[in-house]
Image (cartoon, helix red, strand yellow):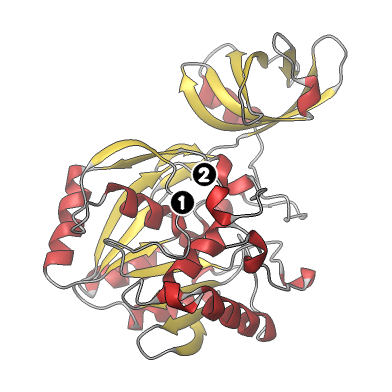
Amino acid sequence: MKVSDFDYRLPPELIAQHPIEDRADSRLLIYDMDRDTIAHRRFRDILGYITKGDCLVLNDTRVIPARLIGHREDTGGKMEFLLLEKVQPDIWQVMAKPGRRADIGRRFVFSNGLLIGEVLEIIEDGTRLIQFEYNGVFEEVLDRIGIMPLPPYIHEPLADRDRYQTVYAKYDGSAAAPTAGLHFTPKLLNSLKEKGVEVVNITLHVGLGTFRPVKVEDVEDHKMHSEYYNVSKKSAEKINRAKASGGRIIAVGTTACRTLETVSDEYGIVNAGYGSTDIFIYPGYRFKVVDGLITNFHLPESTLLMLVSAIIGRKKMLEIYAEAVEKRYRFFSFGDAMFINSSLGKDADNEF
């Protein structure tokens, strides 16, 4: 299975550069696996496709202003850090750009000394461990000088940083938003709850895997970066109860999907807990607990596209993406959404 098998043609003008005014007014492509049909709707219409007894699982991570721009203390050379994960108090794993300037022992200054970072270690994958020095509370300093880490394909400035947060974001820690959730509004979530849908929160802090392209030729050789997750006992119980009662478990985004598949056993029972996951889902994977997926349209040759292909098959994925291009859907983080509306894994790997 080659990475190039997951390529497709995307006109650059279809890459969404900004969020639309009304989150729920984005377009929604609905693929029904059982009937093999496609419908084109608005996102708010998802209310008619999720029924009483279903369980909607949200990733309540919150994006931090993780992009820092500063300079080397000795030479003044420009440096950019992207905070990925806090590994100890005041020590973070970061992506450094340009990496050649971030040798061990180098010190970097941000915002006239409000924050100073020193390189402690260079990790095998090229990221760095940075020790930070500052006065006060780190989160307050970061909120003051940090920049929201928009993906590199977005070239327009973001007027309101809250538009790169879900309305239910709660726990700081992500370097990127779980973008499938950006379409939900409080009104839509309340309507789903009033309908009898169980809405459950879990947490996965989105890290390096979102930014790092697949560089190997064979899909099976790719190694996912680990990311922190937390599933509470209350959330696990709600998910298991819905599953046992015949409701569908619908993951909002690939991050929620990967977390659920990480913490579920071979019988599809979700176990509460926290830790790190590097689960890589690609065609051939058999889903244990997830029954439906709400997701955006993803980059060519990305692990996210491979996860979607694991659900519906690579050929069907390419057919759907071709139709989305033809219908002029908006792609990627601020783009439109797709709802895979059925039980997952049904002979998908036979359609490679």
Which residue is at a point 44% across and 53% down the rendered structure image?
255
What is the spatial separation of the Cα atoms under label 1 and label 2, in whole angstroms? 6 Å
Which numbered circle lies on residue 280? Answer: 1
Mark 2 surroundings within 10 Å by alpha-carbon count, few (fewer than 14), some (14 through 19), many (20 or more): some
Q: Is residue 27 visible?
A: no
Pinpoint residue 121: horizontal percent, then vertical percent. 62, 15
Amino acid type assigned to the residue bearing label 1 in the image: Phe
Label 2 element class = loop
The image shows residue 27, relative to residue 150, as above or below, that is below
* Mark 1 crowdedness (10 Å alpha carbons): few <14, some 14-19, many ≥20: some
Disc on res. 180 = none
Residue highlighted by disc 2? 224
Q: What secondary structure is marked by label 1?
A: loop
Horizontal and vertical percent for residue 221?
A: 56, 48
Q: Earlier in the sequence, mark 1 or mark 2?
A: 2
Quadrant in the picture for the N terminus: bottom right
Report x, y in % for residue 100. 80, 24
Residue at 66% x, 37% y is 147
* Residue 167: percent from left, percent from top: 44, 55
The amino acid on which the numbered mark 2 sits, given as a three-letter code, is Met
Labels 1 & 2 near each other (Cβ < 8 A): yes
Please indicate, yes or no, whether residue 12 appears anywhere in the rendered image: yes
Compared across the picture, whether 96 is left or right of 260 comes to right
